[in-house]
Amino acid sequence: MTAGSPPNKRIKLARRSAGGLTRGRRSRSLSAVRSTTGRMPELTFSENNGRLVIVSPMPVGTRWLFAAIGLFPLLAPWELLVRPHWSGRLGLFFVFAAVISAGALCLSGLLFFAAVAGLSSRITLDAGSMTFTYSAMAPVVPTQLRSYPLADLAAVDVRTYEWSDGAPSHSLRILTTDGITHETASSWSREEVEDYRHKVAAFLSRHVADRPLS
């Protein structure tokens, strides 16, 4: 084996880099998409002419951010497997380097997948057609489209996600009578999501009087 620096030193450096990325990927990715208004990504709400719409976009900039972060774990296999020019008898150091590199590649793959498969969604309640429609789309994922009569909405509530780092996030959840849950993207502000829940409940109370929801 020939290398520019001792293999154990390279392993320690790459392990520290890959480990730091693994431990912090959740908090950094959440913080990266948090806007100055406290939302991640920004939810948009509109109600007019008997239509209530909540859009949960995944901005193009966020997709590029995930892709850029996904490049950093690739430093581990580069430093541990490519640059050292392993040759001859492969020992314990090589196995250790291969394990660390495999983990780094998996992390990069997950981040790249998030970049191309992260969903943007839209929830529409239409009093004219008396329908609830949920659609979700991503560059490499077929568009999902579900439509129900408004009377088939069983519950509207707020779901909270607890994170190991940082504050909890919240999303609006709509449950239909077939047991399927439809959620918006998350927001750091529970007050914002609670406000949307009240608006959806009020909309349904006006147009589906026999099925008031809370």
Image (cartoon, rainbow, N blue to C red):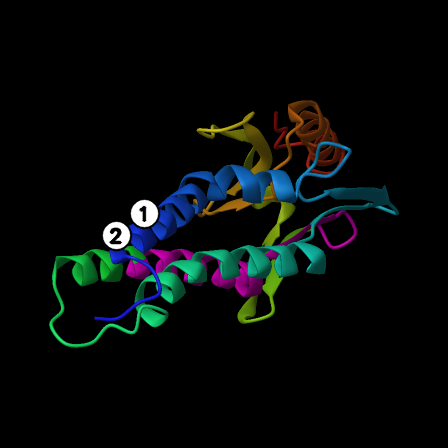
Disc tally is 2
Q: Is mark 1 on a helix, strand or loop?
A: helix
Q: Is 52 in front, or is 106?
A: 106
- The answer to whether the residues at label 1 and label 2 have Cβ atoms under 8 Å apart is yes
Q: What residue type is labelled 2?
A: Asn
Residue type, mark 1 in image: Lys
Q: Which residue is drawn at 48% across and 41% down?
A: 26
Residue at 68% x, 44% y: name it.
41
Quickly name the residue at label 2: 8
What kind of element bears circle 2? helix
Give the position of the C terminus as an image quadrant.
top right
206 shown above or below 111 = above
Residue 191 sits in which quadrant? top right
Pick the quarter of the image with the N terminus: bottom left
Does residue 71 belong to the magenta stretch? no
Image point (73%, 27%), residue name: 195
Residue toward you, 25 or 14? 14
44 lies above or below 38: below
Q: Is residue 75 above or below residue 188?
A: below
Residue 12: numbered disc: 1
State the image coordinates of residue 135 (x, y, percent, origin top left).
Answer: 62, 58
Question: Where's residue 102, x and y in %?
Answer: 29, 61
- The image's mark for residue 79 is none
Is 149 on the left or on the right of 154, as rendered? Answer: right
Q: Would you say 133 lies left or right of 9 here?
A: right
Q: Which stretch is magenta?
A: 101-130
Residue 96 vertical placement versus 54 (above, below): below
The residue drawn where x is 41% and y is 39% is 23
